[in-house]
Image: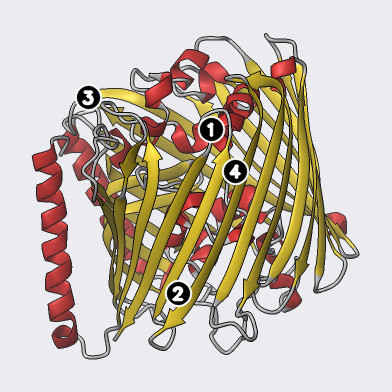
Amino acid sequence: MNSPYGRSVWRIGFFCVLCGLLLAAPTIAGAMEVRLNSQTLLLFMQRNTPTSTDASVVPLYEYLQADIGARSTRGLSFHFYGWAREDLNDSDYYADNPDGELLYGYLDYSRPFSHLNLRFGRHYVIGGLANNSIDGLSLQTDLGPDFVLSVYGGLPVAFDTTAGRSGDSIFGGRLAWHSANLHEVGLSYQNINNDGSTEDQRFGLDLSLALPAGVNLSGRSTYNLESDGFGENFYEARFALSDFNFRTFFENYTYADYFAPGAQTPNPFYVLNRTGEAQTNFGADVVWRMSSDWEFGAKTKFYTYDVNSSSAAYYSGLITWHGQDLTQIGGEIGTMQGNAADNKYILSRAFFYWDRPAGLPLSFISGDLLYAAYDQPIYGQDNSFFASLGAGQHFLDDRLELKLSGDYSSDPYYDSDWRTMLVANYRFDY
Amino acid sequence: MPRRPLLFCLLLLFSILLLVACSGHDQGYSLPALHPPEADLGRNRPTCTDCHEERGGPLAFADFNHTAYFAESHRNAAGRNVQVCNMCHQPSFCNTCHATGIELKPSVMNQSDTYSRTPHRGDYLSRHRIDGKIDPGSCFRCHGNPKAARTCAPCHG
């Protein structure tokens, strides 16, 4: 699987399965729904490549999604999503990257009784400690009225880049106890083996408690069984006062336990793992829906460290006006204030999205402006500017959407960078 | 751990769970597979509590209001109730950010969707030099494995 040949075989195999299911679907189940979503992106940009400077790079991306089976009623269904890329200018900009990826391809069986959900194939598992893509099997079901159990096992997709897949495995699960909406407590476990040795093994606790006065407390703690220590503690409380929605949070990370100590932990995290550092963050955000049109937000987050004995703080505020459908105009300003001069910046953003503009033959027009000022120059430049303008139109009863956008940026990495992108989204149902 | 006994144990566990699940009784409130189509959600950012009780109902719907900060604070709510997300979003939508190898960052893939407040917009390459030093845990959640860290490798090794 690690070799280009292996990846090709994998892709061709799934493509064949997909085609077979597509062809067979109407026959094996007359009522079965088939939905295809194609997103084709063509980018034009100039980049330095391993062999040339300011080379034209023209990648053509195809992101294809297929869903076969009734989505609105439970039962058996098949789901596929993957992408492939071809550089039309044949530059070597992507020489070190794969030309495509299967993101998921799985059979799903679900039924309302017991809230059973069974998935087989490449799919993403979320819940408790799990936030992983696996090639394998997962199952979730109620166990009586008060318990929910989910288990999964297979091969971890994230580790197929290192010495093949022999000796790789991932398995885990979560058992949750809940009572109506008053509380939920979950215990989870995850074990990842890479090339025959344990890469990561964790135990997790997550909870959600409905407290008096409409306060909801939720969070999680993870214990690293390999390094014997709590890697993460993250808890937040949410509550509402009139039209104001508040969230306060506290999080603590012990680097030696949070950044997995396995041999394949990528940099820069592998290095951080050995610093002995521990970080504690806390803060709050509030959103005020003044009316259905106006929304205001403010956020603050403070960072402290044990070893480094420094601190930092982030403050930001935003305002958004909501119009018809997705129409919005908004602005945001924030500042990061670290102890060291090179840990400070000011960020500002203004954007608009005009949905279905009246009198114009377009489905939308959008724009985005970002400006950041750095306290200390990065590569000799102390600010960055980004601008984007886009427009789109629907065709074929809204099944086809074409979007064109142009971006300009001037920043420490690119003096003056133009990028153009043409996107075609096509949706097919039968 | 030897592969064969592990596989056997997993299959046994799955089989038992399947039997238990299939013989189970109705557990009361059941989320629909899709959000009821008769409820006109419109195209705007959904605010669940416009129709549902904030807390005290079968779900804490307030946690799923798509406020301006929802993209950066949905972790706890989604981690416990991903089925709620699935009522409106296909997994491919979540894969825009939660994937191990999608190559294009969310803000490029959805460049013109300026309302969606996707992460890493604009010149994040420069800002990440500061954010990464201050809060590396936020990077690790998405880039903490060999495949997802390919974007880090050209500079970080």
In the rendered view, how is the structure colored?
secondary structure
**Closer to the camera in the image, A380 or A398:** A380
**Relative to A139, is A202 on the left or the right?**
right
* Figure quadrant of the N terminus of chain A: top left
Q: How many residues crowd mark 2 within 10 Å: few (<14), some (14–19), many (20+)? A: some
In the picture of the structure, the residue carrying the numbered disc 1 is A415
Q: Tell me if label 2 and label 4 are in contact, CB under 8 Å.
A: no
Q: Residue furthest right?
A: A242
Q: Which residue is mark 3?
A: A196
Q: Which amino acid, mark 4?
A: Asp
Q: Are marks 2 and 4 on the same chain?
A: no
Q: Left or right of B42: which side holds A74?
A: left
Same-subunit check for callouts 3 and 1: yes
Check chain identity for marks 1 and 4: say if they share one.
Answer: yes
Calculate the distance from the C-alpha at mark 1 to the C-alpha at mark 4.
46 Å
The numbered dot on residue B25 is 2
Label 3, secondary structure: give it. loop
Q: Is residue A145 above or below residue A278?
A: below
**Amino acid at the residue labelled 3:** Gly
Marks 3 & 1, CB-CB < 8 Å contact? no
Q: What amino acid type should be assigned to the residue bearing mark 1?
A: Asp
Tell me the subunit letter for badge 2. Answer: B
- Type of residue at label 2? His
Q: Position of residue B144 (x, y in %)?
A: 44, 31
* Residue identified by numbered label 4: A206
Chain identity of mark 1: A
| Quadrant including the C terminus of chain A | bottom left
Q: Residues within 10 Å of mark 3 (few under 14, many from 20)?
A: some
Badge 3 or badge 1: first in the primary sequence: 3
Pick the residue in front: A175 or A75. A75
Which circle, 3 or 1, is nearer the viewer? 1
